[in-house]
Structure formats: structure tokens, C-alpha cells
């Protein structure tokens, strides 16, 4: 009887101790292996995230067309502030995709990001190049 009680109490403790030791060994192995692999990846590879692009300058922003709110074709909602562009307000049009925004909203967004806030199309540099002249032929 004493032997049965001893086995009933001792074997679960031994089993749990073995599971704990094996878990700690796996944890130690995973920690050291991941750190070594990560160091090699950082030394041999470029960062996965690209270099952040700078937005447009104020001179480039001035070259974007301005229209009144009633002249907007693709809708009168500003995607930056999510407010309606009133008919008497001045709006800025993003060339290429013709999306319209409040002047303040567009200037704030485009000074940080050179893409349209709605469709994410990149603003072409030819738009801002003053040396390029357009001819009808």
C-alpha cells in the first residue's frame, strides 16, 4: 500500500519535472538560434522597409491645379479630413487621377507623402519639371 501511494505521488512529479527541463532546453535553444540567425540576416541583407520618400516642396504644391468646389468631377468629399468640400471653397486637384481635396488638407498630406491619398498613385516628376515644355505637335 505504501508503495502504491509513493508511486502515485512520485511519478507525476518526476514527469512534470522532465517536461519542465525539456521545455527550458527548447526555450534556450530557440533564443540563441534566433538571435544568431537574426544577426546574420541584419549583417548580410538590406532592411526590408524601403527608404521613406519625402513629400512635395511648397513650389511643387503651387504648381498643382486649384478649382472651386463646384468644379470637382469625382465627388466633393475630402479623403484627408473626411469633410465635404463646399461649392464656394477652393480645392486642389491631384494631377493624373483628378481627385480633389481641401487646399490645407492636400498641402499637409502632399508635403509628407508624394502620392494621392485616395488611389495612392505617385505624382510624376514631369509635372513639376519647369524645363519641359509641352508642344501641341
Image: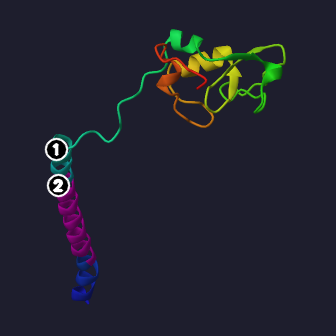
Would you place residue 39 above or below residue 81 in this image?
A: below
Q: Is residue 123 left or right of residue 4?
A: right
Is residue 93 in the magenta section?
Answer: no
Would you place residue 118 above or below residue 44 in this image?
A: above
Would you place residue 137 above or below residue 24 in this image?
A: above
Location of the N terminus (image quadrant): bottom left
Disc number placed over residue 12 in the picture, else none? none
Residue 105 in the image, given as x and y percentages of width and height = 64, 19
For marks 2 and 1, give the CA distance. 17 Å
**Quarter residue 117 falls in:** top right
Residue on which the image places disc 1: 44
Location of the C terminus (image quadrant): top right
**Quarter residue 23 falls in:** bottom left
Would you place residue 87 above or below residue 48 in this image?
A: above
Magenta residue span? 12-33
The residue lying at 65 percent from left, 14 percent from top is: 104
At mark 1, the secondary structure is helix
Residue on which the image places disc 2: 33
Residue 53 in the image, given as x and y percentages of width and height = 41, 26
- Majority secondary structure of the magenta segment? helix
Q: Residue furthest bottom?
A: 1
Q: Residues within 10 Å of mark 2 (few under 14, many from 20)?
A: few
Amino acid at each position: 500500500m505504501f508503495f502504491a501511494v509513493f508511486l502515485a505521488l512520485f511519478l507525476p512529479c518526476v514527469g512534470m519535472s522532465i517536461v519542465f527541463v525539456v521545455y527550458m532546453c527548447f526555450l534556450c535553444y530557440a533564443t540563441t538560434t534566433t538571435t544568431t540567425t537574426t544577426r546574420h540576416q541584419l549583417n548580410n541583407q538590406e532592411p526590408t522597409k524601403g527608404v521613406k520618400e519625402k513629400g512635395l516642396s511648397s513650389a511643387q504644391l503651387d504648381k498643382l491645379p486649384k478649382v472651386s468646389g463646384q468644379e470637382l468631377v469625382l465627388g466633393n468629399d475630402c479623403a484627408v479630413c473626411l469633410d465635404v468640400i463646399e461649392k464656394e471653397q477652393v480645392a486642389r486637384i491631384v494631377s493624373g487621377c483628378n481627385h480633389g481635396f481641401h487646399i490645407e488638407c492636400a498641402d499637409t498630406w502632399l508635403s509628407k507623402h508624394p502620392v494621392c491619398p485616395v488611389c495612392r498613385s505617385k505624382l510624376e516628376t514631369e509635372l513639376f519639371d519647369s524645363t519641359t515644355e509641352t508642344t501641341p505637335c
